[in-house]
Amino acid sequence: MKHSAIAISAPGKVLLAGGYLVLDRDFTGLVFGLDARIHVHVQKLPTSPGVVLSEIIVRSPQFRDAEWRYGYRETEDDGGIQIIQLKG
């Protein structure tokens, strides 16, 4: 079975003031664009038949080749997603 991959890139930004308050029109925020970008590579992992693997792996060469692993699942009540950091 063929596993396709998607690569995505987005510009970086720094939120200096405002946070989630900017969701209210009475408040403002201050954001600066950066020349740094985030690059994301998404692909399905091959698994055995009937096995569902729900894992997010974050690798960052900026932080001495650091790696973080997260598990995720859909919540039953509201259709959201619950994310749990896995021990590496």
Image (tube, grey):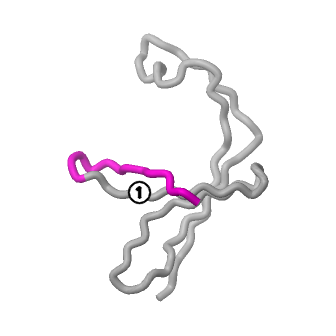
Tell me the crowding category of disc 1: few under 14, some 14 to 19, or many 20 or more residues within 10 angstroms, Cα based. some
Q: Is residue 87 magenta?
A: yes
Tag 1: amino acid? Tyr
> Residue drawn 45% across and 81% down?
47
What secondary structure is marked by label 1? strand
* Outermost front residue: 87
Q: Quadrant of residue 68?
A: bottom right
Q: How many marks?
A: 1
* Outermost bottom residue: 1
> Quick check: 83 left or right of 45?
left
Residue 48: percent from the left, percent from the top? Answer: 42, 85
> Quick check: 21 left or right of 36?
left
User: Quick one: quadrant of the C terminus?
Assistant: bottom right
Q: Is residue 80 magenta?
A: yes
Residue 77: percent from the left, percent from the top? Answer: 21, 48
Placement of 14 over or under 42, stated as above or below: above
> Quick check: 58 left or right of 75?
right
> Residue drawn 47% across and 88% down?
1
Give, as a single range, the part of the protein colored magenta: 76-88
* Outermost left residue: 77
Placement of 24 over or under 35, stated as above or below: above
> Residue drawn 77% across and 40% down?
35
Residue position marked by numbered label 1 in the rendering? 72
> Residue drawn 57% across and 67% down?
6
Q: Between residues 43 and 73, which one lies in front from this camera angle?
A: 73
Residue 20: percent from the left, percent from the top? Answer: 47, 24
Q: Between residues 49 and 11, which one lies in front from this camera angle?
A: 49
